[in-house]
Amino acid sequence: MKCMYCNTPLGESDYCTGCGADISIQKRIARISNLLYNEGLEKARIRDMEGAITCLKRSLKFNKENTGARNLLGLCYYETGEAVSALCEWVISKNLQGEDNLADYYLDQIQSNKNKLDQINQSIRKYNQSVLYCREDNEDMAIIQLKKVINHNPKLVKAYQLLALLYMKRQEYDRSRKLLRKAVQIDATNTTTLRYLQEIENATGKGAGRARLRKKNEKEAEETEVSDTLRYLSGNEMIIQPTTFRDSSTIATFINIILGILLGGAIVWFLIVPANKQAVNDEANRQVTEANAKLATVQVEAEELQEEIDGYLEQVAEAEEDRDAALAKVESYDELLAIAEQYVSGDESNAAEELLNLSSDAYEGNALALYESLSSAVSASLFSQYYNSGTTAYVQKDYQSAAEDLEKAVEADPNREQSNHYNALLYLGMAYYYLGDRDSADEVFNQIIEYYPSNASVIEGYISSSSSGDTTADTLDLSGLGDAATDVTAQTDAAADTSTDTSAAGTDTGESAENTSSEDVITIYDDSASTGTSSDAVWTDPTTGLQYDANGNVIQ
């Protein structure tokens, strides 16, 4: 024992040798705690578990560091089936006294047997479930669960009490009495158990008083047993008189034998046979009831297992979806990084083509910012690439390829920032027109009217709703459509050697040259231009020097 003030070990003196404090009250409290511990120990030895638990709890209130009382309290809890409370007490005891503590042995004994721990846990869960069933008036399932609890944890007094109470409600007093007697063997003085027994005795009329009366009657019957003499009292004297002797004849003897046989047969027929039949029927009913109970239990367990399996399958499916989404995102990020690497290395053309296959919806945060930066950076290069290839295909009268490339060029410049956007739309509309796809051509021409209203007069005759025929198809003035160079080098070289005005035909003279570019390398002619070239020539190829009309025919 140590001083409560300075933690110095105490001796026999009432004063602390370390700090000099008066520790007489502390010693008195410790003695009271030990006294209550001894009283609890005596009660535990006679299996008065409830009384022992009460005394030991009071002992710990006086001295919570009394590890002996705490260990004994854990044993009492464990003996009544409450293993969780026992483990709590032993763990606290071990923390208070780390060495030379019996709690270590108790904990090792329990923790070394994993199956025992599992059974204890299952019994506690099933007991709680049975209590829930009782609150829901589902007595049959509660009885089934409590039977399992008793099989797994035969020392749990509460399970015996609750199961006996359910049997009492059904007026099955014999079963209830048997369960309560088993509970008495575990805790002899449990007030709840004794109260239930008293209720059963009051209900059935079988009590201690009746037992004593039965013994008294048996004793009197032994004293007044019929013998060969007749006994009676005459005053204070016992008179014993022999009975009259009667000699039976042979016929009477046979008659008595026959009557005895008939009486015995009647007893067998009316008493023993029905009793045997009833016993067989009761046994069959009992087996059917147990089989139904087991079947119900198995069904409940099967449903629980199926629910667990379904839950696990859902988790697996969600995990697989998350994995696939993560892999797809990683793959798209890798593709974006590869495109960025191509762009940095100078391969803008391939970077632009591959960037078209990606969608901004697949990115977020920094990746989205990188995607937008690359899209903005390669849009001009992509537009120029498809514009050049589309116009070249148009000149060669490959209208299908021209339409495909020019469509990509228009898509690469959604904000119409490129100077040749108008030219790309006009070439695209004419390519659809020559392919016979009037719906697509009308859609493109309507876009030109919407975006470039000043140039609407150039294509109004080609819109189906306003066209009277196809006679104007060969007379379209395509001057001012910009370049149709076959490579970027030729475009750059020609831009340095030409000073021709490439403003679009059909516009006002004050119109700004928004539809032309300083990069145009094809010489464009108007019908009214006095350049010395034939008025039928629309443009001149800067590489070959050949002149072409509006329909792409070479002018000899």
Image (spheres, helix red, strand yellow):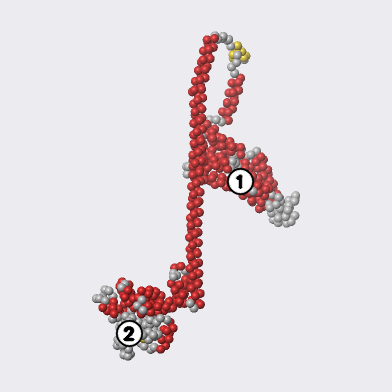
Which residue is at a point 50% across and 69% down the rendered structure image? 334
**Picture mark count:** 2
Image location (x, y in percent) of residue 242:
60, 11
The residue labelled by disc 2 is: 555
Q: Nearer the viewer, mark 1 or mark 2?
A: 2
Looking at the image, the residue that sits furthest to the left is 468
Secondary structure of the residue carrying tag 2 is loop
Which residue is at a point 55% across and 35% down the rendered structure image? 177
Q: Residues within 10 Å of mark 2 (few under 14, many from 20)?
A: few
Relative to 155, is 215 above or below?
above
* Residue in the foreground of this view, choosing between 244 and 480: 480
Relative to 149, is 21 above or below?
below
What type is the residue that disc 2 sits on? Ile
Image location (x, y in percent) of residue 344:
50, 77
Where, quadrant-wise, is the C terminus in this rendering?
bottom left
Residue 541 visible, this angle: yes
The residue labelled by disc 1 is: 116
